[in-house]
Image (cartoon, rainbow, N blue to C red):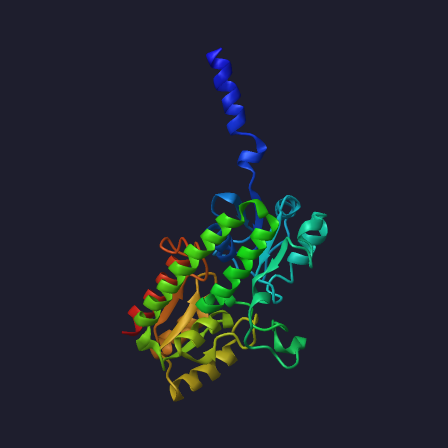
Amino acid sequence: MRLLAIFCFSLLLFTPDAIAKINVFACEPEWKALVDDLGGEYVKTYSATTAYQDPHHIEARPSLIAKTRRADLLVCTGAELEVGWLPLLLRQSGNAVIQEDQPGYFLAASQVERIEIPVEVDRSQGDVHASGNPHVHWDPYRMLVIAEALSQRLQAIDPEHVLEYKQQLSQFTSDWKNAIRQWEEQTKGLQGKKAIVYHKNWSYLLNWLGVETVGDIEPKPGVPPTAGHLSKLLEAVRAQPPDFILIANYQDDKGAQWLHQKTGIPIIHLPYTVGGSEQADGLVSLYNEVLTLITSTTQ
């Protein structure tokens, strides 16, 4: 009888209702991390990409299609960042709840105002995003807006745990605002500095820090650097020397290394998203790592 009672109690503990979680398909690690922070034990998240992949160029593999079929919520960047692979995943999934205009479809960039919106777009300009720069997770204030909107979406999808989601959001907001105050104190000395970037994925970060971008290693967005472009960039650098070159850990740094050898300008290799370094295992630690790398190089 005692064994039977234990067995029945175990079944009660592990009923589907007791362990049910919202299945979340995140396109990038930063959104998986945010969902985990806001959803806690009530979400089960999966990231389609890693910190060492360029999110512009991902293959819509069968394994990703299988994940989208089981998702209750899809959280991606949007603003055409995943245009080469996300539409195919959505079509092949056959999952009605995560299609566009459904509650299970959430694009982070759509929640905030974007920068660098082109007046005109054509193929000659390279990989230009018509909806503006999609790399919004590098503005801490925009992240607060996105977190609020994402929490509301979790509450709508899982109304039984509204209170818990509100508590998680309150904790995240408090911790994030405290971190912003520390980051802004830490980076005061960066205001007025000049940077060269490989790609415009640091624009929001540099705008927030008051750092001016004076050159791009890419001749056009998404186009690898050519010898001619690097030579012109070298001339511009000698006329207006920048303080550093920023390279994300998934980007080819050959052009940056060539420029460094010619000028001595330091290269700063940065984790672009969560998981990009051993230290960057969450959103706060990601910012901590990136800002520490930049400030320690420019002191």
Image height of 156 relative to 41, above or below: below
Task: Report the front residue among 13 and 141.
Answer: 13
The C terminus: image quadrant: bottom left
Q: Is residue 9 left or right of residue 130?
A: left
Residue displayed at 51% across by 60% down: 148
Q: Position of residue 198 (x, y in %)?
A: 47, 72
Image height of 268 relative to 150, above or below: below
Q: Position of residue 272 (x, y in %)?
A: 45, 62
Task: Report the front residue among 251 and 286.
Answer: 286
Q: Position of residue 189 (x, y in %)?
A: 30, 77
Q: Is residue 101 left or right of residue 213?
A: right
Query: From this viewpoint, is residue 290 visible?
Result: no
Q: In the displayed image of the protein, which residue is found farthest to the left?
A: 299
Task: Report the front residue among 95 and 174.
Answer: 174
Residue 296: image quadrant is bottom left
Q: Is residue 299 left or right of residue 213?
A: left
Query: From this viewpoint, is residue 136 visible?
Result: yes
Residue displayed at 50% across by 22% down: 9
Q: In the displayed image of the protein, which residue is found farthest to the front?
A: 163
Q: In the displayed image of the protein, which residue is found farthest to the bottom?
A: 239
Residue 152: image quadrant is bottom right
Residue 182: image quadrant is bottom left
Q: Position of residue 261 (x, y in %)?
A: 36, 74
Q: How many marks?
A: 0
Residue displayed at 68% across by 55% down: 102
Residue displayed at 55% across by 41% down: 21
